[in-house]
Amino acid sequence: MKLPSKKELPDYYEIIRRPVDIRKILGKIDDEKYEDLDALQRDFLLLCKNTQTYNEDGSLIYEDSIVLESVFVSARQRIVEADNNSGTRKFLVGKRGVCCFGALMGLKEP
């Protein structure tokens, strides 16, 4: 998911006040800008919400964003459960944890 150019879809930036795309999210992972999975989740769910707000209900991209949202929430739940079972928080804080989450989501290698 890449943000549209302002030239191609100028109304996108009038409708969507806080644009975000996967590249921006991955950049924040690489730059260690996320303190925890809550911050990552906020951006990822914003990406999905923006997609659903701008695109027509029932369109392929709209439906794909719903699936991605579900996959994200499910993957995060598995990580939290693994942390709870192990008694540590190794996946929830720091770049390594976010990278592991990204790998679980299929976004990047740990």
Image (spheres, rainbow, N blue to C red):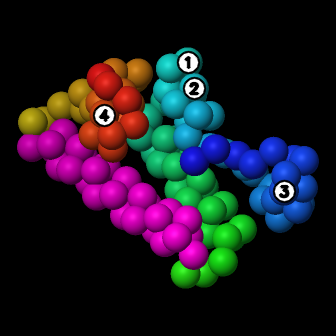
Residue positioned 41% across, 21% down in the render: 95
Q: CA distance from mark 3 to mark 2?
A: 23 Å
User: Observer-nearest residue: 64 or 17?
Assistant: 64
Tell me, yes or no, whether the two marked residues, 1 and 2, touch with CB atoms within 8 Å.
Answer: yes
Category of crowding for the residue at label 4, using alpha-carbon neighbours closer than 10 angstroms: few (below 14), some (14–19), many (at least 20): few
Q: Which residue is mark 4?
A: 103
Q: CA distance from mark 4 to mark 2?
A: 14 Å
Residues in magenta, as a range: 59-85
Who comes first in sequence, dot 3 or dot 2?
Answer: 3
Tell me, yes or no, whether the two marked residues, 3 and 2, touch with CB atoms within 8 Å.
Answer: no
Q: Is residue 67 left or right of residue 7?
A: left
Who comes first in sequence, dot 4 or dot 1?
Answer: 1
Helix or strand or loop: what does disc 2 sit on? helix
Q: Which residue is mark 2?
A: 27
Q: Is residue 10 above or below residue 97?
A: below
- Judged from this view, the residue extending furthest toward the bottom is 58
* Amino acid at dot 1: Asp
Q: Is residue 8 above or below residue 67?
A: above
Q: Is residue 66 left or right of residue 20?
A: left
Q: CA distance from mark 4 to mark 3?
A: 31 Å
Q: CA distance from mark 4 to mark 1?
A: 16 Å
Q: Position of residue 70 (x, y in %)?
A: 37, 64
Q: Which mark is residue 31?
A: 1
Helix or strand or loop: what does disc 1 sit on? loop
User: Observer-nearest residue: 96 or 103?
Assistant: 103
Q: Is residue 82 magenta?
A: yes
* Amino acid at dot 2: Gly
- Judged from this view, the residue extending furthest toward the front is 8
